[in-house]
Image: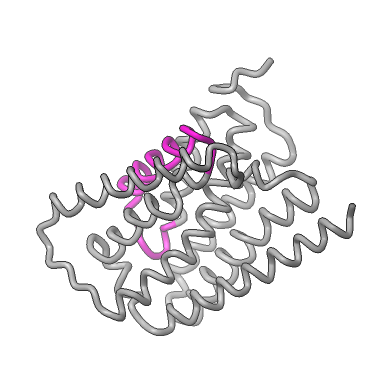
Amino acid sequence: MKNKWIHFDIDKENIFGLICGLTMVLLSIAMIFFNSEVSNICLRDILMILLLGFFTPIYYLLVVKKKKLSVLGIHKSKLIVSLALNVSAGISLLVMFIYKNTEEIVLNVNSFYAIIYILAAGIFEMVFIYGFLRYEFERAFGILPAIFITAIFYSLHHAGFQPEFTKLFFVGVMYVTVFYFTHNIFSIFPFFWSVGAVWDVLVNSEAGNQIKNKTSLYLAILMFTVMIGMSIFVHCKIKNKK
C-alpha cells in the first residue's frame, strides 16, 4: 500500500501532466522574447489560460480518462468547512496586508478592470495548477512532494510577467497547504486566493499596470465566455460517451 505522504509511482498520465506543466512555463518564458500586447494575448490568454490551462485538463481527465471533477478538488464534500476556511483565511490575509502596508492604495475603474481579469486567470490557476498538476504530482510522488513541486510550477508560470520566483514559491506552498486541509478547491478560491493575487498585483507588483485597461476587461469577459463554452462541450462529450 502506497504511503500517501511520500512515494514514487510514475505512469504515463503523470508524464503527460509534467509535459503540460513544462509547456505552461515555456509559454510564459516566450512572453519575455515576444513582448507585445498581441503576443501576450496569444501566448498567455489563448494558449496558456484557455487551451492548455482550462480545456486540456478538463477534457483529458473527464473525457479521455473518464474521471470526476473531484480529482481537481471541485466537489461538494466539506464545502461549508472549505468556504469558512476560505473566508477566514482571506480576511486574515487582508488584515495583515493592510497593517503592514506603507504604500498609498488607489482604486479606480482601471483597478476594477484588472481585478476582473485576475479572477479569470484565477480559474485557470485553480483548474490547471492547483487542480490538474497538483493531482498528477500527488499521484506520482505523494502529498508532501506535490506541495513543493506544485509551488515551483506556480512560481515559474509567472516568468514572463511577474518574475518574483522566491516570493511566489512560498505563496504557492501556502495555497496548496491550505487546500490539503479539506482537499477542496473552495478552501482557497475565490476569497483567500483573490486577496493575495489582487493585493500583490495591484499594490506590490508592477505587473498590475499591464492589465489596468479596458482590453483586460474585454479579455476577461471573453475568457469567461469561452470557458463556459468549453465546459458545455466537455459535458456533451461525456453524455455522448455514456
Residue 166 on the magenta segment = yes
Q: Quadrant of the N terminus?
A: top right
Q: Which SS type dominates the magenta stretch?
A: helix
Q: Is residue 138 above or below residue 65?
A: above
Quarter location, residue 98: bottom left
- The residue at the point 80 percent across, 63 percent down is 236
What segment is highlighted magenta in the picture? 158-184
Q: Residue at x 74, y 51 (%)?
A: 62
Q: Residue at x 35, y 49 (%)?
A: 168
Residue 116 image point, x, y percent: 42, 71
Q: Is residue 195 highlighted in magenta?
A: no
As rendered, which of 147 and 25 lies closer to the eye? 147
Please tell me how many numbered marks the rendered image carries.
Answer: 0
- The x, y position of residue 222, in whole percent, is 56, 78
> For this rendering, which residue is in front, 147 or 67?
67
- Residue 41 point in image, percent of width and height: 51, 76
Q: Give the farthest residue toward the bottom.
A: 214
Q: Name the outermost residue toward the top.
A: 1
Q: Quick check: 70 left or right of 28?
A: right
Where residue 127 appears, as percent x and y from the top left, is: 57, 53
Q: Is residue 129 left or right of residue 211?
A: right
Furthest residue in direction front, as rendered: 80
Q: How is the image coloured?
A: one colour
Q: Residue furthest left?
A: 102
